[in-house]
Amino acid sequence: MTQTGIDNLAKEQRVFEPPAELAASANVKADEYDRAAADRLAFWGEQAGRLTWDTPFTDVLDWTNPPFAKWFVGGKLNVAYNCVDRHVENGLGDKVAIHFVGEPGDTRDLTYAQLKDEVCKAANAITELGIEAGDRVAIYLPMIPEAVVAMLACARLGAVHTVVFGGFSSDALASRVEDCEAKLVITADGGYRRGVGSALKPAVDEAIAKLGDASPVENVLVVRRTGQEVAFDQNIDVWWHELVDESSTEHEPEAFDAEHPLYVMYTSGTTGKPKGILHTSGGYLTQCAYTFHAVFDHKPDTDVFWCTADVGWVTGHSYIVYGPTANAATQVLYEGTPDSPHKGRWWEIIQDKKVTLFYTAPTAIRTFMKWGDDIPAEFDLSTLRILGSVGESINPEAYVWYRKNIGGDRTPIVDTWWQTETGAHMLSPLPGVTAAKPGSAMGPLPGISAEVVDDAGHPVGNGEGGYLVLTEPWPAMLRTIWGDDQRFKDTYWARFPNMYFAGDGAKKDEDGAIWLLGRVDDVMNVSGHRLSTTEIESALVSHPTVAEAAVVGATDDTTGQAVVAFVILRESAAESTDEHIATLRNHVAKEIGPIAKPRSIMVVQELPKTRSGKIMRRLLRDVAENREVGDATTLADSSVMDLITAGMKKPAADQE
Ligand code: ATP
Ligand code: MG
């Protein structure tokens, strides 16, 4: 008997071919897959040629001590030089690197020449604060150009940055500062969110106070963004506008080893305590540069890119800071929320800045679905040519909505599967090559080796579900968990011998395309069937009244576990009635089978999400099983759980 990890229930018939014109002019064509497969290491060696190396590498990969990889052995480079200086040297100094849009409406364009000056000044300033190569610097900033500048300045010095999302609490900041022993924190007085200046500096002060004598922080460099009043300790606090603005624009970049640490990024904590993921220089930048070029089909002369992620998330690292700048891209950086001051803000920015490549998350797309089609319809989105999605599986319904209402039914969608740990895109359609199916990340990119395996680690057949694994090392792979090699081995390399296990369930459809099915930890066991969250949630979202859905397994006397669903309705839907709930339950049964029919469905206003927009199902499981709700510190909005539990106080009656 083949043991398959997860049942395959959903069927999807829709396919979208690449537009002919895009296919003809695409940066990457179909032959690249075979070329990369024929000699994977030679392929990555060639991609490393996208970078400028101070000292060439002698070997592409050293994998003699797995799972500890060394990529581009012996090579030396400066990451910031590659992202900024060389473009200026190549005559692109006047090209806009960043179109900044502040939430209050202020705008600022930075050319590559200006970005270079800013990065050099910041590098000189942090050197003056005693930061040297290898030191750690925590960055706790809003989405303002200084965030990009600070990261690149660290990279220039070989200092290791750890960016902490600006919405995190002082506790989250303190634990990260402590874990990586950051000597310097770069922050701002505050940032704008929903029309108000939301303070940041006090959280830094609190974090340092909390750590007390154990605090490794020697200085706090403070950007003035909102002008709000902040406490200032002359012994450690320094204003950015006093120190950085007065520093020299001359700074000689030093070349570092390809394996020199670049940053530590803590995972978003959807499943548990965040892990400090270590990324290094040459391999990481190579894969960011290549995937940005290939997956977004980036054309340097004409494209305007916009990734809506926060820099405090890995997507902001790879596809705001490193991938785009390594490719000399022009991009939009937006400070605020999508509904401030109105619900069409993003579409207005796309119209104003003539964005051509747009990258966002399914959670945002479902929110726009909820708000209604008429909002994007008011704006001219005709410049868009490729849309991207990242963070979770995109429900087929949300995909089709995105393509139609944002992409004018012409743009391909690249559904990019990757993780903090993988550093860069791993699975994705290629926009000029792949006939894409809505909801599927399709398959590994050229040079990447992935499989779906069963419990015994054997590849599953088409039409079967299992576990997504990576079978060969890749350049942007994590090198370890900061300070904990053993946890690195145990977490990722122990489940299946010689394979990296990502923690995600997946299936191959009848044509061999890969579909992500959600976290293995979230799989529900109903009467011996292993059900994925993704398929049931997508079935719910395919009902015209539903915008978002989350399902969890709750203990059940008869079936072992039962499916319990939480849904957010579209604004166009009427108040929910018992009859409507019954309709939704039957809809799931009809779409993917009676086994998946939820035992109960609760209508909620919001779902518990991490800062990167991921649903924290373990908290919903606590609610569904009437337990005390667990650790919610990485939630974007901690009041959401109170609302949901309050709603649950009415007996969670079995709706059979
Ligand atoms: P933690 O590991 O601390 O629980 P996290 O896994 O949420 O946090 P990230 O690295 O930000 O932290 O998220 C990576 C995960 O996001 C993947 O393992 C996968 O579950 C999900 N994911 C990302 N992109 C996609 C996609 N295109 N399709 C399906 N799932 C995706
Ligand atoms: Mg993870």
Image: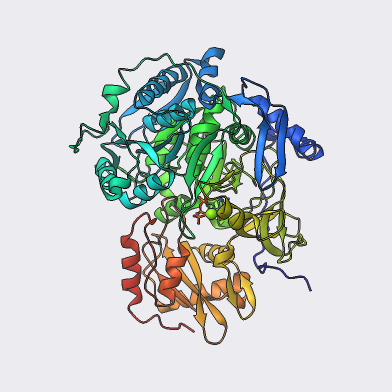
Q: Tag count in the figure?
A: 0
Pick the front one: 256 or 641:
256
Judge whether 493 appears above or below 150 on screen: below
Specify the farthest residue to the bottom: 558
* Viewport quadrant of the N terminus: bottom right
Left or right relative to 243: residue 70? right
Specify the farthest residue to the front: 213
Q: Image quadrant of residue 10?
A: bottom right
Asked if residue 207 can be seen in this view, the reply is no
What residue is shown at x 43% (from left), y 75% (from top)?
624
Judge whether 435 appears above or below 240 on screen: below
**Picture colour scheme:** rainbow
What residue is shown at x 45% (from left), y 41% (from top)?
308
Expressed as whole percent of the image width and height from the top left, the position of residue 562 reads 53, 78
Left or right relative to 19: residue 333? left
Pick the front one: 133 or 608:
133
Q: Image quadrant of residue 461?
A: bottom right
Expressed as whole percent of the image width and height from the top left, the position of residue 391 reads 52, 50
Q: Image quadrant of residue 503?
A: bottom right
Expressed as whole percent of the image width and height from the top left, the position of residue 55 reads 64, 21
Judge whether 57 appears above or below 585 on screen: above
Expressed as whole percent of the image width and height from the top left, the position of residue 356 reads 53, 33
Judge whether 99 appears above or below 515 on screen: above
Left or right relative to 216: residue 42? right
Asked if residue 310 can be seen in this view, the reply is yes
Specify the farthest residue to the right: 38
